[in-house]
Amino acid sequence: MKRTINFNKFILFLSVTMIITVFLFQSLNYFRYIQSKDLSTIAEFNSSKLNDIMYYTKNSKEVDLDQIIETTDNDFSYEKNQIQTLNENTWIKLKLSRSDDDENIIFLDYPFINIDSAYVSVDGKWVKLKDSQNFIYSYIKLPDGFDANQYIYMKLENLNTNLNFNLRLDTENCFYLSQNQKLIFRLLNIGVIFFLSIINLILYVIVKEKKYILHFLFLFSLVNTLFQISGIPKIALGFNDISLAYIWVFITSMTATYFSYHYFEIRKVTPKLSRWYQFLLISIVLCLSLILIFKLLAFTTVVLLFVVLICGLGGSVSISTYLYYKQLSRLYVIGLLLFIISAGIFTLSIFGVWDWRDFLPDVLFLASSIEASLFTVGIMSLIKSDKMKVKSLEIEASTDRLTKLFNRCYFEKVVIPKIVETEQKKGKISILMVDIDHFKHVNDTFGHNIGDVLLVELAQVISNSVRQQDKVIRWGGEEFLVVLFDADLNTAIVIAEKVRKIIETHEFENVKKITVSIGVAEKNTNENIECWIKNADDALYKAKRDGRNRVVVSFLNLSPIKIEWSNVFESRNPQINSEHRELILLMNRLIEEYFMSNNEKEFIILYDQILEHTVSHFSNEEKILSRIEYPDLGNHKHIHESIVNEAIEAKNLLITRGKHMSEIIEFLIGKVIMGHMISEDISYYKYL
């Protein structure tokens, strides 16, 4: 999404980036200064640059030591660009301007130019010296007693007039220690970048986004480029292949260009630069092809200049993309700018635009590691942020804005798959359909705002009344669906009655007292979700029709059920427990008769037994409550009388075909077993 550029932010961003860059370079210089001190634990690095180097301007191919000694100074020049013919070997000569006997190492601070051989005068004789190839830089060790007044003659390999390098003089210990430090430092950075390239590859495999595989290709080619310019091949293989190094530089430039073209979305962000990037890519590919096919190293200068141009374009594009579009990680932009600046300075220093410093490759190594690290960290942060945003959006889309409960979307996407999984594991699932009684009256009396407050509070009450694994969903309006996992019909009935009772006794804000009707349905294995919910909804409708403030169970599509004795039924009086158990036993016989034979005559006989036992139990229970002086005995007797009257009326309706046997079962379970034993009887248990 495009946004207006903030000039102050632009200046601040550039300032911070430049401060970090300057700090990086100054830190390295400070490190060099510290190394120059006499500290036993840190390698000294106080080498001196050798000036007044004279280059043989003619063809050195057939010239030996005797001939070069006889050559006059007219055939030498202090400028490399005066050399007429470049070939594998070029003669140079120099005299040491310092006479410190401890400084006996002469080395080239550029890894691709090697000292093929060197000659010094010792006691009037010319002694040949060879590079031992044990370190990153090519070097010779001056023998004791050499004649400092005589020229030192060297034959250099792979000398290119376009390349900038220095001959330096150092002590043996300092040179060895500094070389080991460089080797370890460069190996560590190469290892870090290689590791991060693998991380980018893994990110691509996981996320399947093109930018990760492109950055992996860039980092992988960068690893090979840094390996070639590190000087490590000289130690491992005995030589540095500058052609191979150029090839990897071109490949890295190409992958970097293509990555930035894709990652910065050049066509969208800066369409005018799109053709420039395409031109750069085509030019790099053509030059690389010419080098590979015809071995034309002259094109390397052109392509390396393209590298500088790419660095400049990359810096400007990254800044503009970050400032105009919310697409990039701030960490990565900083890391990228550090890499671009160091790569540009490194390239320009090679060609002599800036003075060559032997620590410049190390800056490039460090900046490359920082770029790779910050990109990976930044991208992983963005992935995490994106996941959090997606999760937040999913939660928002799956949550009812008013009650903060889950909604139907959540039910379809999350709950239904969990229901299927539970069924596959042979688990039992039930649902409660809960609806507020006379909610229209609440809205008409108190207003819709108070009605909304009531819905929010009721949602909290229901959530606190069920188990942790259960899911409470706002189904619509004043209806709530509660999905009970690992709950058969008995458990569901107990939970439903508990919810109904808690709501009935709860004092709500503004409205004070309300009641709910609840429909209960256990899911049959062969039953689809829609039919299951409809059964619960039908049971809820029946609860409304039968007077509200009650739990009604749906027995449709269920196999024979059995009410199990629960700890909820347990009181501290043996007689009451015994009579409750007998009531449940008779109830199970009635249910079995309904499902097995469906004989109405036998059903009525069993129903009469239940009615007779219920009347007897109520009488005995009232006597016990009278003895313990139960304070709510009067109301309890009234409830007993109401239940008996409803039971007698239900029997008459059954005989006259006004009720079905299934409705009688629903009445007994909902009104007598669950409605009375759980809701009413449990209130006097504490007095026993």
Image (cartoon, grey):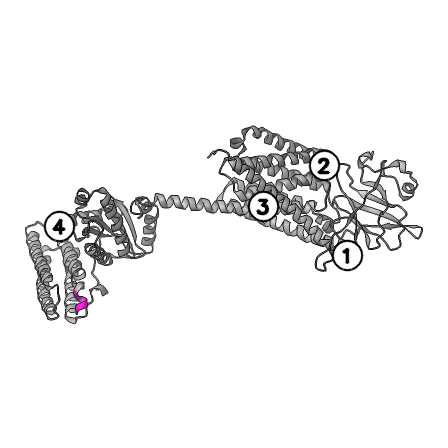
Residue at the disc numbered 4: 547
Residue at the disc numbered 1: 173
Splitting the image into 4 quarters, where does residue 143 fall? bottom right
* Magenta stretch contains residue 606: no
- Crowd band around label 4 with a 10 angstrom C-alpha radius: few (<14), some (14–19), many (20+): few
Residue at the disc numbered 2: 353
Q: Residue furthest front?
A: 8
Indicate the amino acid at tag 2.
Val
Q: Position of residue 128 (x, y in %)?
A: 87, 50
Indicate the amino acid at tag 3.
Ala
Task: Provide the secondary structure element on which disc 2 rests.
Answer: loop
For the residues labelled 4 and 2, the Cα–Cα distance comes to 95 Å
Q: Look at the magenta stretch and give its main secondary structure.
A: helix
Per the rendering, the mark at residue 372 is 3
Tell me which numbered mark, 3 or 1, is placed earlier along the sequence.
1
User: Between residues 215 and 680, which one lies in front from this camera angle?
Assistant: 680
Tell me which numbered mark, 4 or 2, is placed earlier along the sequence.
2
The answer to whether residue 578 shows anywhere in this view is yes
- Highlighted magenta segment, given as a residue range: 684-688
Q: Position of residue 59 (x, y in %)?
A: 85, 36
Tell me which numbered mark, 4 or 1, is placed earlier along the sequence.
1
Indicate the amino acid at tag 1.
Asn
